[in-house]
Image (spheres, grey):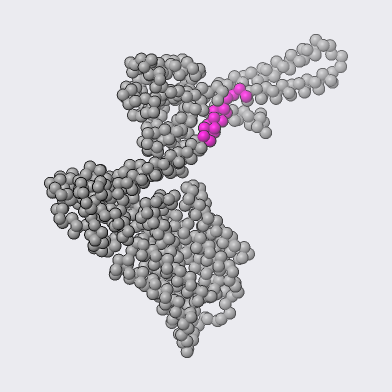
Amino acid sequence: MVNIIFNAALICYLLSGLGYTLYLVFRNSIVKQFSIYLLGLGLFSHTVTIVLRSIDTGHGPYTTGFEIASFLAWVIVLIYFFIEFKYKIKDLGAFVIPVVFLILLFSAFQSREFSLIDESSTMFWLTMHRTLSIIGYAAFAIAFGAAVMYLIQENQVKTKKMGVMYFRMPSLEVLDNLNYKVISIGFPLFTLGFMTGSIWNIKTDESFAWDPIRTLPLIVVWLVYCSIFFGRLLVGWRGKKAAQGAILGFISVIVSYFFHVV
Amino acid sequence: MSDVNLILVGVNHKTTPVEIREKLAFTKGKIEESVDLIFNFPEIIEHTILSTCNRVEIYARANCQDSAINSIKQFICDFHGLSILELEDHFYSYRNEDAVEHLFRVSSSLDSMVLGEAQILGQVKDAYSLAKDLRSTGLVLNQLFEKAFSIAKKVREETGIAERSVSISSAAVELAQKIFDDLENRTVMLVGTGEMAELAAKHLISYGVKTVYVTSRTYDHAVNLARALNGSALGFDDFKNELYRADIVITSTSAPNFIIKKEMVEQAIQGRKNKPIFFIDIAVPRDIEPNINSLENVYLYDIDDLQIVVSANMKEREKEAENAMSFITQEVTKFNNWVGSLDAIPTIVEIRNNAETIRNEELEKALKKIDNLSEPDKETLRLMSSSMVNKILHKPTIKLKEKTQSEDGHIYLKAIRHLFHLDD
């Protein structure tokens, strides 16, 4: 049953992502409405699978690779919905929801067995570490979507070749602001997640073994977002540079994910 | 469209020069005067007058199309004291589907001088509501105009016909909005006091731009324009140092060389911590070094670039107009079907045929059961059954014909068709 609902969520995200992308090219308000409803339906069924599984496991969705990826996708959709209704940024869905679908698709191929390790003694730190990091990652995913849109739009304005999407997509300023906002929320959360993760690591392993393969990629990710964040504040890196940074950052997130979680 | 005779007679900017159009215009007062005069033509059942600066059109439903078209032409000429011989060539007239299509095109702004302009829909709406107030419209025109409004709305929303700007200064505003989003509280700097620059600045101000700086080689010109735009004047030697304050810079000097150079812009952009600047160079020869466009967060459009944007937008509107046309064609067919549904005759024929079939079947059955009937007796039975059918159907037939001419006629028709199982 849970599997069926999970697959339903996956299909909803796929269709919703397709819908958003179609809406980008062919204006049709019905397609847009449909995409939003499908996304809502996807989020609902996704939530159900996470809740049911958490009841079974007795803890939050952050112990196995499957849970983490699924939880990440869920948080992205949640943040996306917030942005969609608060800022009404047209077409962001076309750049974010396909990413959500891919993450959930990736999780679908992960083992769905429950985690066997008993971590109840350090549960607090584990929960903090995983939850904060995942919210941070989700913010980075949104920043990635906004950055791709920025680069497309910037290129159109700069080269004076306005394509179909020029009129549909928001202004450079809105996209740059969104990029900045989500990173300035995501970066501190990710930093906290990183710190609580270290504490958890020390608590679980008395002889705190430094594992460079798992840790180094995270430090790279942290450095990338650190320079994006402070680069804007101190040197005024904005616009194209900030967008390129957000894309580079998200690629580093994906790479580090495979080292750190998988 | 069998017995609903829609017609349209008019002139517009394509058929008639403004010197004649202005003589034919109907102001509100003149329309009020005209209503009853038009109803003096016995063939006219309902009508609406649409008069804008680009067109004068009278839509009507009439008993006889040919005579109604002539009557209306005559009326327009007589009313304005002009001779029909003079105007005959300027008039166009459409009937039925073509008249419907024309109104749908007009209200969707596909027949406008500037495709997709927003004014016409409001003008059609005003014309219709005035006609409605004056009780000159009825069943068909009401439906026609209401339909035209919903189509126009849909065309605006679902095609890009009105989306892209088609003048230089609105194209500049549109670009500024793609860079800065909100123009509220932005700063614009005018370098040179050219007329086009002034126009663009006014346009930007109407979108919320707050601070205006004006500089010119002749300081007095700068002061005058600054006063007109509620801004402040800068000396021509100072503006370079103030460039970093401006979000939007519009140049229009008659200088023979570039007066804004790459180094200046580099400095300005540093001064504003990489916040974007939008340069609009309206001057010919150009005022701004073209290679500044390669700087990050700097966007430069010269007059040709804007012109290209405008003509691309124009083409795009034409393309969108084609999309809109295919939609309108569908809607014309739908309207046509609705009008067809107003026609009582086919329904009456069907009911009669059904009744006739039943009568024949029952008559044959009865005749078989009764023996020894002479031919005259049989004939009597036939006549009796026939006159029963006729008498039963007579009153409903008359009533139905009458009702289908009223506001809710189609409801009667639908009910009748339902009760008699005509659509099963």
Left or right placement of residue B278 versus residue A204 in this view: left
Q: Image height check: is A170 above or below B406?
A: below
The answer to whether residue A201 is seen in the rendering is: no
Residue A145 lies in quadrant: bottom left
Residue B5 image position (x, y, % from top left):
51, 22
* Residue A151 appears in the rendering: yes
Name the residue located 84 percent from the left edge and 11 percent from the top edge.
B374
Indicate whether A234 appears above or below A163: below
In this orientation, which residue lies closer to the viewer: A150 or A105?
Answer: A150
Q: Nearer the viewer, residue B341 or A21?
A: A21
Quadrant for the N terminus of chain B in the image: top right
Q: Is residue B290 found left or right of A10 in the rendered image?
A: left
Instruction: Name above or below for residue B379 compared with residue A114.
Output: above
Residue at the spot x=67%, y=17% of the render?
A: B391
Residue stretch rendered in magenta on the structure: B329-346
Residue in the foreground of this view, choosing between B234 and B94: B234
> What secondary structure is the magenta-colored segment mainly?
helix
* Circle count: 0
Q: Which residue is rendered at x = 43% and y = 23% of the image? A: B92
Left or right: A8 in relation to B20: right
Q: Is residue A174 left or right of residue B364?
A: left
Q: Is residue B344 magenta-colored?
A: yes
Asked whether A243 or B407 is in front, the reply is: A243
Q: Residue furthest bottom?
A: A207
Q: Hey, which quadrant is residue B88 in on the image?
A: top left
For the C terminus of chain B, the quadrant is top right
Q: Position of residue A220 (x, y in %)?
A: 42, 75
